[in-house]
Amino acid sequence: MLQAMNTLALDNYRLLGRSGLRISPLALGGMTFGTDWGWGADDQESRRIFDTYLDRGGNFIDTANFYTNGTSERLIGQFAKDRRDRIVIATKYTLTMRPGDPNSGGNHRKSMVRSVEASLERLQTDYIDLLYMHAWDGVTPAEEVLRAMDDLVRSGKVLYVGISDTPAWQVARMQAIADLRGWSPLVALQIEYSLAQRTVERELTPMAKEMGLGVVPFFALASGVLTGKYTKADLDHGGGSAGAEGTRKNVAAANGVLTARNLEIAEVVKSVAAEMGKTPAQVALAWTLLNPAVAAPIVGVRTLKQLEDNLGALDVVWTDAHRARLDAASSIELGFPHDFLASPMSRQVIFGGTKVARLP
């Protein structure tokens, strides 16, 4: 059976989480804008990528204060200057910009406010459409984060808020606090999600769907592993790099995605893509959009050619057989309590043999 995707172009906009904000089904990632880390696109190529994405109808740009040491935000600010209001710009705070200064990073109010002020200057704008807390620091009280975010929204410097790289229980707790206190709710959850990283299906993606956060996946191509660019010979990477600098291979190794298992998944992706007449990147990106919790995976490219290829993900038409093969190759165990509650014994003692379906 053929299954066409509902979104076939960048200008088939969708809502972000529980908000009324319209975004494209693929977000353009800005982490590759700038050569500061040794592997990004230079200013001219970044501009070509940016302009092409917008010309095709795209409107959702993702960056962070930390990306390419601030160059990403500066370039996006330059590129967006004459058409700022038609673009949804998302950026992040948390990661330190001044190592050695204990308050230049983290999730606390001082870090958030100063980071936003600096991002506004680099982006050459007076408001940020979506501000993410970049990563849970484990020490800042959730109430401090939420109240500071709400203050920024009330000031008009930030329009919407989201969260990234945080345990599901903490996100759910924070959303409940925001709701009960009338503070600005979290509308987006940015997490790693791909055929090579499906552990988020245990708690994070179902939590996001239930709590009204649109999922914005990063590393949907597993740092390039799912495109088939690496082989078993690349597994001898010497441990990679501890950070974002170096080469793309270093990044893949440091992130733990350059593994024998993921190379096997990549082979299945290549095989399915060949049968569908698509590229592996298109198939892997399109697969993330099959999850109803996903709002827009992030496309991170270094060349215009890569962008053109990635946009083809919106044209993928699925068959049940192809979906089943990818699921079999990449499936994970959900673990307790999910597997236990789905067992025939549990269903029997809970429902007594009657059939009960959840409302959509």
Image (cartoon, rainbow, N blue to C red):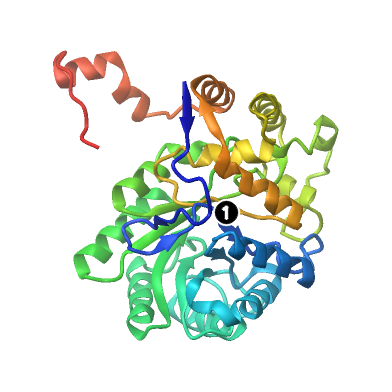
Residue 147, above or below 295: below
Examine the rendering and report whether any part of residue 35 can be seen: no
- In the shown orientation, is residue 141 left or right of residue 119? left
- In the shown orientation, is residue 264 left or right of residue 353? right
Hey, which quadrant is residue 355 in on the image?
A: top left
* Residue 174 spot, x, y in % from top left: 32, 60
Residue 250, above or below 33: above
* Residue 177 spot, x, y in % from top left: 26, 63
Q: Nearer the viewer, residue 231 or 84?
A: 84
Residue at 35 percent of width and 29 percent of height: 338
Examine the rendering and report whether any part of residue 138 can be seen: yes
* Residue 284 spot, x, y in % from top left: 61, 38
Q: What amino acid type should be assigned to the residue bearing mark 1?
A: Ile
* Residue 316 spot, x, y in % from top left: 57, 36
Residue at 58 percent of width and 86 percent of height: 121
Q: Nearer the viewer, residue 128 or 172?
A: 128
Hey, which quadrant is residue 16 in on the image?
A: bottom left
The residue pinned by badge 1 equals 298
Residue at 55 percent of width and 78 percent of height: 83
Residue 132, above or below 117: above
Residue at 59 percent of width and 42 percent of height: 313
Quarter holding the C terminus is top left
Hey, which quadrant is residue 353 in on the image?
A: top left
Residue 20, above or below 265: below
- In the shown orientation, is residue 208 left or right of residue 298? left
Mark 1 burial class by Cα count in 10 Å: few <14, some 14-19, many 20+? many
- In the shown orientation, is residue 47 left or right of residue 350? right
